[in-house]
């Protein structure tokens, strides 16, 4: 049988836990203020973006880059995210605080790394 050894301690084992009921604040001002994304990318006219778009090899250059949904397409009580009307940050926060969610890929890894520094308990993982 294997011997029962004490658990190895790491530097983050001694960090005082901080309660966190919302993900860390994003860096962009629009996301911090919960401003919905406009999803109208055809109107972006930055010179670097215009240069890249001019090099397209596609026969049809009228590519739809706009993914906005009309804000009155669904009623306010519609329980799902509507592009261009709802803040994705608010929607995800409310979704993950009200239902069981499964994190996959990079998001789960980011949360695990965040929890090493901030000591999330089971309630905060949910």
Image (spheres, rainbow, N blue to C red):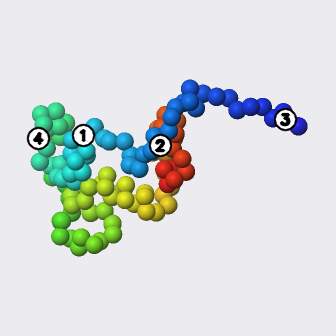
- Which residue is tagged 1? 28
Vertical placement of residue 114 versus 66, above or below: above
Ranked by sequence position, the earlier of labels 2 and 4 is 4
Ranked by sequence position, the earlier of labels 1 and 4 is 1
- Which residue is tagged 4? 45
SS at badge 1: loop
SS at badge 3: loop
Instruction: Count residues near mark 2 (Cα–Cα under 10 Å), then give few for <14, some for 14-19, many for 20+.
Output: some
Do we see residue 85 in this rendering?
yes
**Residue 17 in picture, x, y percent from top left:** 50, 38
In this rendered view, identify the residue nearer to me: 123 or 111.
Answer: 123
- Which residue is tagged 3? 2
Q: Quadrant of residue 96?
A: bottom left
- Which residue is tagged 2? 111
Instruction: Count residues near mark 3 (Cα–Cα under 10 Å), then give few for <14, some for 14-19, many for 20+.
Output: few
Residue furthest top in the image: 11
In this rendered view, identify the residue nearer to me: 61 or 123.
Answer: 123
Residue at 38% in and 49% down: 22
Callout 3 touching callout 1 (CB < 8 Å): no
| Label 3 to label 1: alpha-carbon separation | 51 Å
Residue at 21% in and 41% down: 29
Ranked by sequence position, the earlier of labels 1 and 2 is 1
């Amino acid at each position: 049988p294997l011997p029962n050894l004490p658990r190895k301690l790491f530097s983050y084992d001694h960090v005082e836990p901080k309660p966190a009921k919302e993900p860390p604040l994003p860096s962009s001002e629009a996301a911090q203020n919960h401003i919905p994304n406009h999803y109208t990318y055809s109107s972006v006219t930055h010179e670097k973006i215009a240069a890249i778009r001019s090099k397209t090899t596609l026969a049809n250059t009228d590519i739809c880059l706009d993914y906005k949904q009309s804000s009155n397409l669904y009623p306010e009580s519609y329980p799902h995210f509507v592009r261009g009307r709802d803040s994705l940050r608010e929607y995800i926060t409310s979704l993950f605080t009200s239902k069981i969610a499964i994190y996959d890929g990079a998001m789960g890894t980011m949360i695990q790394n965040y929890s090493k520094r901030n000591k999330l308990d089971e309630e905060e993982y949910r």
